[in-house]
Image (cartoon, coloured by chain):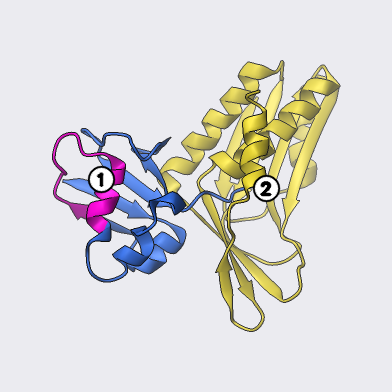
Chain colours: A yellow, B blue
């Protein structure tokens, strides 16, 4: 099972996990990214490259499928204006082996950070805005999977 | 013709998200295109003056800035991505 969704709306966590659990593998790992409730932050605006995002995330998922014995992978990434506490991204993996499920889930979220065409802009209560800068450590984590 | 698309603060500084330009000379790289665009008036210099802050995609695939544009239809210029 391969599921990639790029959407503005929220998603049903229970349904997403249930779909992975139903594959019969015995092990499901997941990661959920949520907008932080930092001081003064009222919203995070996610811009993306519509013509590229889904194909690129699909390529990242294919990379995970090539590296680990997985029965299922789901990646949901939202765009648009999201408030603190809102879910941004979901990564779920199913496998007969817990190590594969956990490692592939970590790989996917690391790669999404540095290989998926999204950009985040912070909106603060005082009206200020700031584009989130890419972190060198995120790139290093992604590159670490090539070691 | 070649379509250019811009994202995040590159888009904001230039003041548009897309434009079409005459196809650059054969052999032109993304870096060469960036240098040409940065010489324009308006927000182009601000957006594109420091290529070390930029990343690019050709026809929806990430590429290094020294990649030749060739027969590509679309070049995207943007800051390093911050997904996840």
Residue at (78%, 21%) from the top-left corner? A100
Residue at (78%, 25%) from the top-left corner? A101
Q: Which residues are magenta?
A: B20-37
In screen coordinates, is A69 left or right of A136? right
In screen coordinates, is B83 left or right of B35? right
**Residue B74 part of the magenta segment:** no
A116 vs A38: above or below: above
Count the labels in the image: 2
Residue B4 appears at what percent x and percent y? 28, 51
Mark 1 surroundings within 10 Å by alpha-carbon count, few (fewer than 14), some (14 through 19), many (20 or more): some
Residue B18 appears at what percent x and percent y? 30, 57
Identify the image quadrant of the N terminus of chain A. Answer: top right
Residue at (55%, 36%) from the top-left corner? A57
Identify the image quadrant of the C terminus of chain A. Answer: top right
Q: State the residue position of label 2.
A: A89
The one nearer the camera, A34 or B40, is B40
Q: State the residue position of label 1.
A: B32
- Real-space Cα separation, disc 1 to disc 2, in angstroms: 36 Å
């Amino acid at each position: 099972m391969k599921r990639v969704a790029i959407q503005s709306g929220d998603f049903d966590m229970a349904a997403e996990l249930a779909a992975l659990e139903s594959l019969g593998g015995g092990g499901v790992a997941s990661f959920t990214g949520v907008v932080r409730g930092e001081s003064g932050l009222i919203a995070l605006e996610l811009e993306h490259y519509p013509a590229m995002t889904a194909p690129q995330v699909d390529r990242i998922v294919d990379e995970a499928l090539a590296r680990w014995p997985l029965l299922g992978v789901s990646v949901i990434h939202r765009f648009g204006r999201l408030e603190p506490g809102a879910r941004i991204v979901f990564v779920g993996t199913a496998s007969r082996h817990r190590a594969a499920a956990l490692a592939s889930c970590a790989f996917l979220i690391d790669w999404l950070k540095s290989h998926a065409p999204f950009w985040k802009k912070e909106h603060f209560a005082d009206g200020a805005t700031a584009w989130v800068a890419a972190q060198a450590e995120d790139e290093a984590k992604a590159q670490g999977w090539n070691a | 013709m070649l379509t250019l698309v811009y994202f995040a603060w590159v888009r904001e500084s230039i003041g548009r998200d897309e434009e079409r330009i005459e196809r650059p000379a054969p052999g032109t790289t993304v870096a060469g295109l960036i240098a040409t665009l940065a010489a324009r008036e308006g927000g182009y210099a601000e957006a594109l003056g420091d290529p070390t802050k930029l990343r690019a995609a050709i026809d929806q695939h990430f590429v290094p800035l020294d990649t030749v544009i060739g027969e590509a239809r679309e070049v995207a210029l943007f800051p390093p991505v911050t997904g996840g």
